[in-house]
Image (cartoon, grey):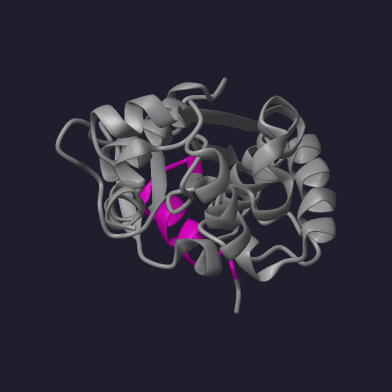
Amino acid sequence: MDLWTYERALWAEGFRTVCGCDEAGAGPLAGPVYAAAVILPREIELRGLNDSKKLSPKRREALYGEITSVAEAWSVARVEAAEIDETDILSARIRAMQLAINGLSLPPDLALIDGSRDHGQSAAIVSPHRLLVDGDALSASVAAASILAKVSRDRYVVKELDPQYPQYAFAQHKGYGTKLHYERLDQYGPCPAHRQSFLKKWAAKRGKA
């Protein structure tokens, strides 16, 4: 599929500068949720560009370097586990995306937001925007943002969280609820990097054991 279809339509409407925006890390039991916003040069060809979830870690890393080298502007932001617990994951995702848009050195005329939601209980996308379900598979700009968000989060988990809390093997599961992660939770209990609101079922089950 041509990943520039949506951007072309927006350019035709008069939006000169369009950014793609996506988040990564909504589902894990630990660590921040990340978001990225990217403005690419018009119709630039980035070989293999696709939804970050469909790419190998090696390909994502390579594309990260290519995207950050050629982008007219890019920005990455995150919302910490503590704030996720204080609000909710939807609000945290939305806040991270708005922070990423705010961080762009070139203000976009319009942001293409991946997904079907642009607000939560305590956060909203306030920049001019359009929602695009499955945007990371349909739009070059959103696909690029998905890669920057995913790679940035993975790097943080591997380089910072894993050395800080080696007992949880974060580098292996990236904070997701794998069998290994739950085994380590059973053994060590949660650490400050864990999202307590995501551990309620685990805590209830453990309390009954």
Camera-nearest residue between 105 and 151:
151
108 to the left or right of 93: right
173 to the left or right of 206: right
Camera-nearest residue between 166 and 63:
166
Q: Quadrant of the C terminus?
A: bottom left
Q: From the top left corner, tell me how far across and down residue 178 is, in percent.
A: 56, 62
Camera-nearest residue between 29 and 144:
29
Queried whether the magenta region covers residue 60, the answer comes back as no
Tally the marks: 0
Q: From the top left corner, tell me how far across and down residue 175 is, in percent.
A: 57, 47
Q: From the top left corner, tell me how far across and down residue 123 is, in percent.
A: 23, 32
Q: From the top left corner, tell me how far across and down residue 16 is, in percent.
A: 48, 40
Residue at horizontal 73 percent and vertical 45 percent from the top:
171
User: Which residue is outermost to the left?
Assistant: 121
Q: Quadrant of the N terminus?
A: bottom right
Where 132 falls versus 41 (above or below)?
below
Residue at horizontal 57 percent and vertical 31 percent from the top:
76
Residue at horizontal 65 percent and vertical 70 percent from the top:
54
Queried whether the magenta region covers residue 8, the answer comes back as yes
Which residues lie in the magenta part? 3-19
Residue at horizontal 31 percent and vertical 51 percent from the top:
130
